[in-house]
Image (cartoon, helix red, strand yellow):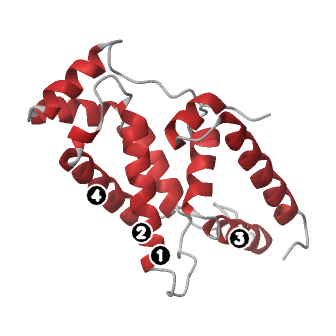
Amino acid sequence: MTTHHTYTVWIESGREAGLLLSAQQGDTDSFGELLRAHLRPLHSVCFAMTCDSERTSHLMGETASLAWRNLSQLPVGRPFFPYLARIARNLAIAHQRRRSGERRELPAQRPSGGPWGGSTGNPALIAEEQRLIGLYQDLSADERLLLALRLIEGLSYPRIAMILDVPVGSVTHRLQGLRSRCETASRPGAP
């Protein structure tokens, strides 16, 4: 049974628009409050796209900086998190393109920082974890973002569609395709 977390904004209903308007007028405190309210889901999205703590921090910083510089482009009344998620996505794709020629190596530890195989040190478990992380790292930034929004943040298909700015049917189709690919790749003996 899969447990989904529910993404919750820690800003009172209707207050986000006021904070956005103040931030667009140069109020850095309002921008900071908006950003703090969305740090956890932004971290989840950035980590899902990078699989690396250091690169996650860098991506979050770049996202916040670019969001601040281009804040006037977001219409007041539009939700702030989709704006942040799209910026993070675009930056992650740009980074991925720049790194496309680099040889991809698995980290020395799990992305969470713990040892491969957990405390067991079981070679079969270590190999399986590394294989699955390798498969995940082969996903595009869009595919990682989609999985993060659905599986980590537990967002509904309509909410994901709003964030990605695509029809709900596209979200459904993409998730079904990813599930099929993941199921095929996770079978024992899969390449």
Circle 1 residue: 97
Cα distance between the residues tagged 2 and 4: 12 Å
Q: Quadrant of residue 34?
A: top left
Cα distance between the residues tagged 4 and 1: 16 Å
Q: Which mark is residue 94?
A: 2
Percent of width and height locating residue 12: 32, 13
Mark before the other along the chain sequence, 3 or 1? 1
Circle 3 residue: 126
Image-based side of 144 in relation to 37, left or right: right
Q: Are marks 3 and 1 in contact (CB under 8 Å)?
A: no
Percent of width and height locating residue 141: 54, 61
Image-based side of 36 in relation to 100, left or right: left
Q: Quadrant of the C terminus?
A: bottom right
Q: Quadrant of the N terminus?
A: top right
Q: Secondary structure at mark 3?
A: helix
Cα distance between the residues tagged 4 and 3: 33 Å
Q: Are marks 2 and 1 in contact (CB under 8 Å)?
A: yes
Q: Residue at x 35, y 59 (%)?
A: 59
Cα distance between the residues tagged 2 and 1: 5 Å
Number of numbered discs = 4
Q: How many residues crowd mark 4 within 10 Å: few (<14), some (14–19), many (20+)? A: some
Q: Quadrant of residue 110?
A: bottom right
Nearer-the-camera pick, 153 or 99? 99
Reply above or below: 36 against 133: above
Q: How many residues crowd mark 1 within 10 Å: few (<14), some (14–19), many (20+)? A: few
Q: Amino acid at mark 2?
A: Ala
Q: Amino acid at mark 3?
A: Ile
Circle 4 residue: 62
Judge depth for marks 2 and 4 and give the one in front: 2
